[in-house]
Amino acid sequence: MPSLFEPTPPNILPELHQRLLAFYGKPAPRDVWDPLTQLIYSLLSARTKTEVSLQIIRDLRNRFDGWQGDWTRLRDASIAEIEEVIRPVTHYEKKSHQLKETLQQISDRIGVLRLEPLGRYRTEKIRAWIEQLPGVGVKTSAAVVNFTTLRRRALCIDGHHQRIAQRLGLSSPKADARQVEVDLMALVPEDWTPEMLDEDHSLFKLTKITRSSSCMARRCARRMSCAAASAHCSIYARRPRKGPRRSVAHIR
């Protein structure tokens, strides 16, 4: 598939970011969790609706005293006890085993059931360490280092973010999530903070792909000198649907 941008302008990502900010306004503040809580959430949220995942985190915190980031009781719980709480998530049987094994491995390898001790290391080393855990890939490792109190520079590339980036020609259509992140990070200005990368991820998630053959260029918050602006554009910004974003208001 040919790129919509030939060649890709060096300032394309900041310009897209600003256009989306102008269209949507600033996203609601994220409730910044400790890295272990984020890891648990990311493991459970795969292929599960956001509102369900948020409720499961609340239920786990209530059941296993996890509100202060101490997940010892969850680690020590039986598989049956864990499954009882996380049953609403997709593939809960598999995830219950992954979750328990992950928490045990963290305890064994770090000596404490926390991920904050990893903060002494560079970002790439932290992510490589996390990706050795059961069921953890590049998306989860990016979320753990970027969305949490670790606040490192990384872009969390979920399936929707990946498709948008590829459709815009910012990454190869054959690239996996890891390569898409590499390609996008190459376009990120050096002065962008971890918080701005988090914000960029949230804005990308508000962009929709349509199969309509009609030109959507007039509605596109990302419109610029791209092929789509004069052809059958299939990318446009959408107003946020009613539903939760993980903000302070939603988690408690």
Image (spheres, rainbow, N blue to C red):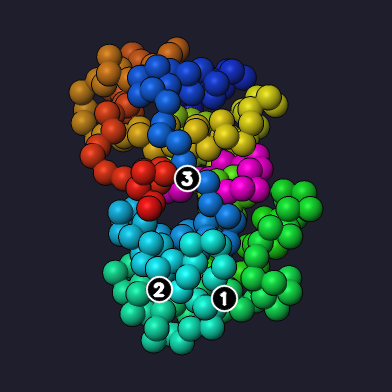
Name which residue type carries label 1: Thr
Specify few, some or many for label 2: CA neighbours under 10 Å numbering under 14, 14-19, or 20 or more.
Answer: some
Residue ID at (59%, 18%) = 11
Q: Left of 29 or right of it: where is 11? A: right
Callout 1: SS: helix
Magenta stretch, residue numbers: 148-159
On screen, residue 246 above or below 128: above
Q: Give the overall secondary structure of the magenta segment.
A: loop
Q: Dot 1, how many residues are within 10 Å of its Cα: few (below 14), some (14-19), or many (20+)?
A: some
Q: Which of marks 2 and 3 is nearer the N terminus?
A: 3
Q: What element carries label 3?
A: loop
Tell me residue 71's x, y (percent).
54, 71
Q: In which quarter of the image is the N terminus?
A: top left
Total numbered circles: 3
Residue 239: image location, x then y, percent:
27, 28
Instruction: Identify the residue position indicated by label 3 in the image.
Output: 31
As helix, strand or loop, the secondary structure at mark 2 comes to: helix
Give the distance between the C-alpha atoms of the residues marked 3 and 1, in whole angstroms: 22 Å
**Which residue is labeled 1 in the image?**
72
Q: Is residue 152 found left or right of 19 in the rendered image?
A: right
Marks 2 and 1, how far apart at CA: 12 Å
Residue 98 appears in the rendering: no
Residue wearing tag 2: 63
Q: How far apart are marks 2 and 3 (CA)?
A: 20 Å
